[in-house]
Image (cartoon, grey):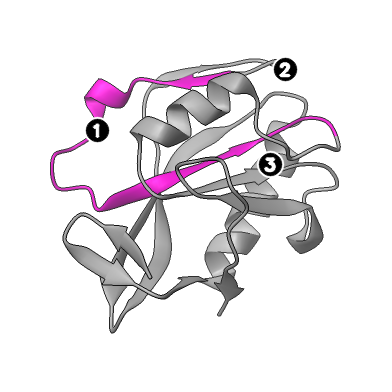
């Protein structure tokens, strides 16, 4: 059982079209990292992730920064997604600090930017299971 505010959930589902969009954006952005917030909500004890929220920021081959203070108040942000230009989807120290402050579910996608190169983490930087639907 996980919690997002007052709402509890037992599983996480990501829309398959959103996964394809994340993979496409990562490929198009390479070698620059891209970052966005994940949008979703809890329905019937499942966290359903179905959108991206793009915020102003800066990106390079070594990192991406979002201007979180620009986040709309009613955004349904539940976590984040960003790409790594290499083959490792392990979170950096900066990633772990961000995860701890911004939502429950975080995705890092690495080369070759496909379903197998996606890793998901909770706010503590621990691997989390999810289902693509």
How far is mark 1 from mark 3, CA to CA?
A: 22 Å
Quadrant where the N terminus is found in the figure = bottom left
Structural crowding at the residue carrying mark 1, measured as other residues with C-alpha within 10 Å and reported as few (<14), some (14–19) or many (≥20): some
Residue reaching furthest bottom?
A: 44
Q: Is residue 77 above or below residue 44?
A: above
Quick check: is 76 in the magenta stretch?
yes
Q: Is residue 105 above or below residue 98?
A: below
Q: Which residues are magenta?
A: 64-86
Identified at 16% across, 61% down, the residue is 6
First in residue order: circle 1 vs circle 2:
2
The numbered dot on residue 43 is none
How far is mark 1 from mark 2, CA to CA?
A: 24 Å
First in residue order: circle 2 vs circle 3:
3
**In the shown orientation, is residue 34 left or right of residue 51?**
right
Circle 1 sits in a helix, a strand or a loop, which is it?
A: loop
**In the shown orientation, is residue 37 left or right of residue 41?**
right
From the top left corner, tell me how far across and down residue 131 is, in percent: 58, 74
Identified at 13% across, 40% down, the residue is 73
Structural crowding at the residue carrying mark 3, measured as other residues with C-alpha within 10 Å and reported as few (<14), some (14–19) or many (≥20): many
**In the shown orientation, is residue 133 left or right of residue 69?**
right
From the top left corner, tell me how far across and down residue 36 is, in percent: 46, 38
Q: Which residue is mark 2?
A: 61
Structural crowding at the residue carrying mark 2, measured as other residues with C-alpha within 10 Å and reported as few (<14), some (14–19) or many (≥20): some
**In the shown orientation, is residue 94 left or right of residue 87?**
left
Circle 2 sits in a helix, a strand or a loop, which is it?
A: loop
Identified at 53% across, 33% down, the residue is 35
The numbered dot on residue 26 is 3
Q: Is residue 59 above or below residue 1?
A: above
Q: Which residue is mark 1?
A: 71
């Amino acid at each position: 059982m996980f919690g997002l505010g007052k709402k509890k959930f037992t599983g996480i589902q990501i829309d398959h079209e959103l996964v394809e969009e994340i993979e496409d954006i990562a490929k198009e952005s390479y070698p620059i990292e891209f970052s966005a917030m994940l949008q979703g909500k809890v329905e019937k004890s499942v966290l359903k992730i179905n959108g991206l929220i793009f915020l102003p920021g800066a990106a390079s081959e070594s990192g991406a920064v979002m201007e979180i203070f620009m986040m709309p108040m009613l955004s349904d942000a539940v976590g984040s997604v960003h790409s790594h230009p290499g083959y490792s989807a392990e979170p950096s120290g900066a990633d772990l600090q961000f995860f701890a402050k911004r939502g429950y579910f975080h995705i890092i996608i690495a080369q070759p930017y496909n379903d197998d190169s996606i890793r998901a983490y909770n706010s503590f930087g621990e691997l989390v299971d999810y289902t693509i639907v």
